[in-house]
């Protein structure tokens, strides 16, 4: 926030916040439209309107008080709170919409002020013989006077005037409650629960009355001028909201018991006929509308001034001009002039009834945002969020949901238009402004807390370790992440839906500030690669000077899914033995961890067209066969392999071929091999013939070949040799299972 805003000496206490809010709540709508509401839906229906309206306003007031007690709320009020919680981009999008609604509200209240002169129009005709048809004769001079006062005198004079109009407002209400009518003398209290249906519907009446309850945040706009916002905003806002609700309930009762439904609906100044002294109601109406207009004219410029101070607008001069205040006390003189021009345009239009619903939409979005911030901050558990006043998360959630529901219930078209306008503003500001901070922080906090609770729950939950429920939870440790992407691709396929994967890039070096920074840069790049390929793999980096130490560190990583990791994947390039030797030398470590082992041998052919997966088994591979086939099916489930197929080859010596073929058919029919016998091709292995030659011959065009190996092969003196001799085929996945798999 601009220093000129944050460093200005503040002079106001709690009372101005309360008076600004209560004078807006008990404003024009109360005098001009509340009688119509009571006459339309009755006392009970009006109570429902008050209740539903305050299901929005009370959670909003509490959320506003909570957020305001967490941080120093500077100039800009609601805009400051939203932008500092959701980010400047979305805060500015909501802030501009909020500013427009505040600026247009000035015109709305001034036009309502003109309605107060309806009471003297008959007198003017009688005394002067002149009939006034256009209230703009009163409203335009009134607005110009307000503008002159605000530009020349600023908020200090505005607050002094506010004390006067609030006093008049209080007197008018007292005299209203003291009054009586002939109807009240014969009133039957049973009519209080009489059911009444409005011709235009309950929510139409609600839409007219709801703006009466929306003034509780008006005082927040003075936040930059308050001595102690953390105290003044909660006390002033909540007091105005609750007292306003109580007063409206009593007004509804007084109106019901003092006039008939027809009179309430047809006479917008019916309160003057009920009051002890009738003229006080037009005077009170004038005072209420002027105070509301005055409040909006004080708040709106400060909102746009704060937006300009954040350099939201793409033009530097516009930001400077809007944010510039007076040298003495930073009064937003330029912003006041801009607001005055907007208000004057709408006053000249003469009727803003259609615009009033849009104003309600913008306010509703603002309130929903405040409630949503409070709700999400509760679950984000950000240590920097420590409000001294705390709302309840369920109240904030209720407020946000009610805002969305009521927006569409009141006027679906305006609701869509309001949300659409702010989306357009958000993308425009994001594209043009230098400020790039978004909502990521608060959402990440919520996700991190949810993830933590879920991980702890899964760890504590009793795990079913049946073989039928096995699924791969794979760790991949790779030194060559940027030389070859084959391992990352394999992890992507395994982790797409059925399995879980953690890919660890291994930096073989001593841990230091420089190597850590280097590893972080590579991690960022790998995450970008993973994101571009729409991978579900979790990516980390590991720094260690030793291959063995790196493998030991890797196998102790917790599973990201909440279940332990059960498989290790390594990758090497055919012809290069250094990393492969390190893996084989640490086979005993993997065995101790009870990890299945997969070694991916990559070639220049890569994964080809991703159509054919060849699985090779023999009599020594029955333990590996299920895992090999299951991995093949999992890989085939990825969209990259949507046209792929699995071919299974079984090799046996010629003399036992028939016996092993029968045994293989038995395994498939019993379900121990989850494949059809028709999908298996049995090949004889003649005397002196190398199995590798058969694989090279039949799988030369395969896109992935899966071959099993077992512990005895690894422990032999020529343990590297079993991974060699496959020069004519593409990528090979060598599989060794340490725990048997049974697949239904």
Image: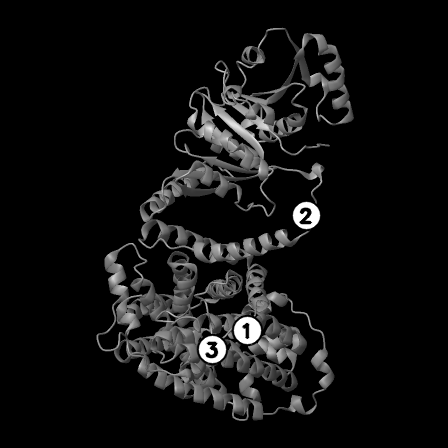
Give me the residue at 26% from left, 74% from top: 330
Residue beneath label 2, please? Answer: 463
Whether pointer 2 and pointer 1 mark residues with C-beta atoms closer than 8 Å, the reply is: no
Q: Report whether 34 appears left or right of 43.
A: left
SS for tag 3? helix
Q: How much space separates mark 2 and mark 1, taking CA atoms? A: 45 Å
Mark 3 and mark 2 lie on one chain; the one further toward the N terminus is: 3
Observer-nearest of 81 and 655: 655
The quadrant of the image that shows the N terminus is bottom left
Q: Where is residue 143 shown, x and y percent of the image?
A: 35, 75
- The answer to whether residue 279 is visible is no
Q: CA distance from mark 3 to mark 1?
A: 12 Å
Q: Within 10 angstroms of label 1, few (less than 14), some, or many (20 or more) residues?
A: many
Residue 320 shown left or right of residue 375 in the figure: left
**Which label's residue is closer to the chain start, 3 or 1?**
1
Q: Residues within 10 Å of mark 3 (few under 14, many from 20)?
A: many
Q: Are marks 3 and 1 in contact (CB under 8 Å)?
A: no
Q: Regarding mark 2 in the picture, which secondary structure is present there?
A: loop
Q: Which residue is mark 1?
A: 58
Q: Is residue 133 above or below residue 484?
A: below
| Residue reaching furthest to the front | 717
Query: Of the residues tagged 3 and 1, which is closer to the observer?
Result: 3
Relative image position of residue 473 (x, y in whole percent): 58, 39
Residue 720: in sight, yes or no?
A: yes
- SS at circle 1: helix
Examine the image and state in which quarter residue 690 appears: top right
- Percent position of residue 572, x then y: 46, 27
Q: Which one is in front in this view, the residue at disc 3 or the one at disc 2? A: 2
- Image quadrant where residue 526 sits: top left
Q: Is residue 587 left or right of residue 331?
A: right
Q: Nearer the viewer, residue 554 or 66?
A: 554
Q: Which residue corresponds to mark 3? A: 234
């Amino acid at each position: 926030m601009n220093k000129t805003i944050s460093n200005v000496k503040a002079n106001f206490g709690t009372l101005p916040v309360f008076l600004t809010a209560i004078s807006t709540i008990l404003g024009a709508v109360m005098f001009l439209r509340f009688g119509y509401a009571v006459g339309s839906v009755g006392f009970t229906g009006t109570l429902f309107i008050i209740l539903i309206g305050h299901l929005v306003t009370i959670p909003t007031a509490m959320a506003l008080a909570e957020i305001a007690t967490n941080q120093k709320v500077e100039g800009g009020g609601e805009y400051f709170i939203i932008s500092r919680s959701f980010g400047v981009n979305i805060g500015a999008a909501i802030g501009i919409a909020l500013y427009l609604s505040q600026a247009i509200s000035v015109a709305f209240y001034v036009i309502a002020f003109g309605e107060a002169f309806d009471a003297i129009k008959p007198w003017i005709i009688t005394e002067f013989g002149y009939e006034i048809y256009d209230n703009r004769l009163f409203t335009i001079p009134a607005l110009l006077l307000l503008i002159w006062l605000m530009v020349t005198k600023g908020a200090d004079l505005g607050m002094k005037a506010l004390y006067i109009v609030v006093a008049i407002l209080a007197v008018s209400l007292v005299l209203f409650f003291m009054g009586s009518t002939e109807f009240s003398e014969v009133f039957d209290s049973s009519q209080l629960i009489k059911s009444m249906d409005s011709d235009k519907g309950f929510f139409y009446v609600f839409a007219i009355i709801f703006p009466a309850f929306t003034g509780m945040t008006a005082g927040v706009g003075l936040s930059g001028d308050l001595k102690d916002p953390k105290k003044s905003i909660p006390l002033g806002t909540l007091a105005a909201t609750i007292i306003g609700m109580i007063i409206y309930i009593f007004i509804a009762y007084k109106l019901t018991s003092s006039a008939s439904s027809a009179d309430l609906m047809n006479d917008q100044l019916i309160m003057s006929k009920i009051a002890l002294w009738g003229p006080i109601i037009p005077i009170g109406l004038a005072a209420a509308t002027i105070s509301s207009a005055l409040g909006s004219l004080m708040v709106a410029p400060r909102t746009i001034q704060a937006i300009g101070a954040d350099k939201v607008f793409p033009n530097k001069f516009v930001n400077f001009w809007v944010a510039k205040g007076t040298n003495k006390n930073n009064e937003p003189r330029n912003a006041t002039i801009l607001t005055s021009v907007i208000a004057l345009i709408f006053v000249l239009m003469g009727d803003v009834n259609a615009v009033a619903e849009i104003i309600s939409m913008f306010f509703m979005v603002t309130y929903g945002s405040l409630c949503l911030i409070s709700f999400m901050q509760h679950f984000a558990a950000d240590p920097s969020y420590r409000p001294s006043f705390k709302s309840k998360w369920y109240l904030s959630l209720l407020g946000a949901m009610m805002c969305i529901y009521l927006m569409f219930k009141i006027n679906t078209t305006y609701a869509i238009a309001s949300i659409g306008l702010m989306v357009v503003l958000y993308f425009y500001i994001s594209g043009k402004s230098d400020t790039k901070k978004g909502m990521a922080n608060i959402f990440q906090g919520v996700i991190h807390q949810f993830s933590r609770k879920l991980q702890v729950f899964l760890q504590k939950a009793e795990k079913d370790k049946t073989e039928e429920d096995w699924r791969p939870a794979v760790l991949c440790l790779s030194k060559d992440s940027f030389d070859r992407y084959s391992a990352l691709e394999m992890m992507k396929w395994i982790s797409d839906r059925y399995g879980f994967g953690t890919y660890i890039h291994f930096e073989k070096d001593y841990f230091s500030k420089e190597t850590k920074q280097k590893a972080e840069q590579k991690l960022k790049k790998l995450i970008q690669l993973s994101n571009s390929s729409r991978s579900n793999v979790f990516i980390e980096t590991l720094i260690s000077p030793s291959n063995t130490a790196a493998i030991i560190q890797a196998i102790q990583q917790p599973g990201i899914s909440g279940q332990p990791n059960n498989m290790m994947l390594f990758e090497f390039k055919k012809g290069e033995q250094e990393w492969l030797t390190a893996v084989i030398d640490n086979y005993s470590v993997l065995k101790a961890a009870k990890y299945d082992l997969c070694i991916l041998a990559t070639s220049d052919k890569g994964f080809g067209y991703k159509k054919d997966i060849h699985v090779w088994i023999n009599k020594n591979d029955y333990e590996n066969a299920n895992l090999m086939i299951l991995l093949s099916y999992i890989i085939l489930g990825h969209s990259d392999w949507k046209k792929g197929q699995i071919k299974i080859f079984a090799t046996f010596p010629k003399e036992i071929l028939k016996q092993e073929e029968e045994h293989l058919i038995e395994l498939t029919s019993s379900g121990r091999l989850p494949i059809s016998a028709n999908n298996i091709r049995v090949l004889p292995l003649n005397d002196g013939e190398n199995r590798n030659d058969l694989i090279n011959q039949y799988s030369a065009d395969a896109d992935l070949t899966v071959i099993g190996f077992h512990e005895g092969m690894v422990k032999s003196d020529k343990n590297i040799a079993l991974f060699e001799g496959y020069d004519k085929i593409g990528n090979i996945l060598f599989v060794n299972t340490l725990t048997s798999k049974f697949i239904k």
